[in-house]
């Protein structure tokens, strides 16, 4: 704090507010989050991503029809690269039971 005060920076407010308090309020841990909260956050995130993608698509289309396709291709590739790899689906061993005609 002394270095900040003596360095000649223009500081608005109390420099002491930058210090971490000795007693922190109790915080949640990942194990405190229930499945409904995770599902809600995931749905909100997907909705936000789709909205951003739609906005980007509309902006690119308004600029140039050909540029929009190229721009979305680049955008989708970059999103795929940033996403974690998909978990491969494991095949179930065949069963000796006859299959139902209902599917």
Image: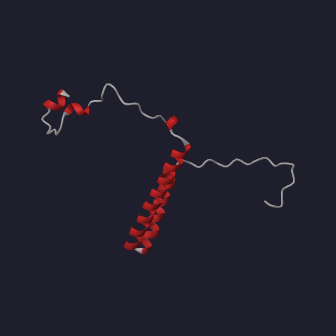
- Is 45 or 72 nearer to us in this picture? 45
- Is 11 or 39 nearer to us in this picture? 39
- Is 37 or 97 nearer to us in this picture? 37
Q: How is the image coloured?
A: secondary structure
Tag count in the figure? 0
Q: Is residue 30 left or right of residue 64?
A: right
Q: Quadrant of residue 19?
A: top left
- Is 80 or 32 nearer to us in this picture? 32
Vertical order, 34 against 2 (above or below): below
x 45%, y 60%: residue: 75
Q: Quadrant of residue 9?
A: top left
In the image, residue 10 lies at what x, y percent? 14, 39
In the image, residue 60 lies at what x, y percent? 40, 69
Q: Is residue 51 left or right of residue 17?
A: right
x 47%, y 60%: residue: 50
In the image, residue 56 lies at what x, y percent? 41, 64
Vertical order, 23 against 83 (above or below): above
Vertical order, 29 against 96 (above or below): above
């Amino acid at each position: 704090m002394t270095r900040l005060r003596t360095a000649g920076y223009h500081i608005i407010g109390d420099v002491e507010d930058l210090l971490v308090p000795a007693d922190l309020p109790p915080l949640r841990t990942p194990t405190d989050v229930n499945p409904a909260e995770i599902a809600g956050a995931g749905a909100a995130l997907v909705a936000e991503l789709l909205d951003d993608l739609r906005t980007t698509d509309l902006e690119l289309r308004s600029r140039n029809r050909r540029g929009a396709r190229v721009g979305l291709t680049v955008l989708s590739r970059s999103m795929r690269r940033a996403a974690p790899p998909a978990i491969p689906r494991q095949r179930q061993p065949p069963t000796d039971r006859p299959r139902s005609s209902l599917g």
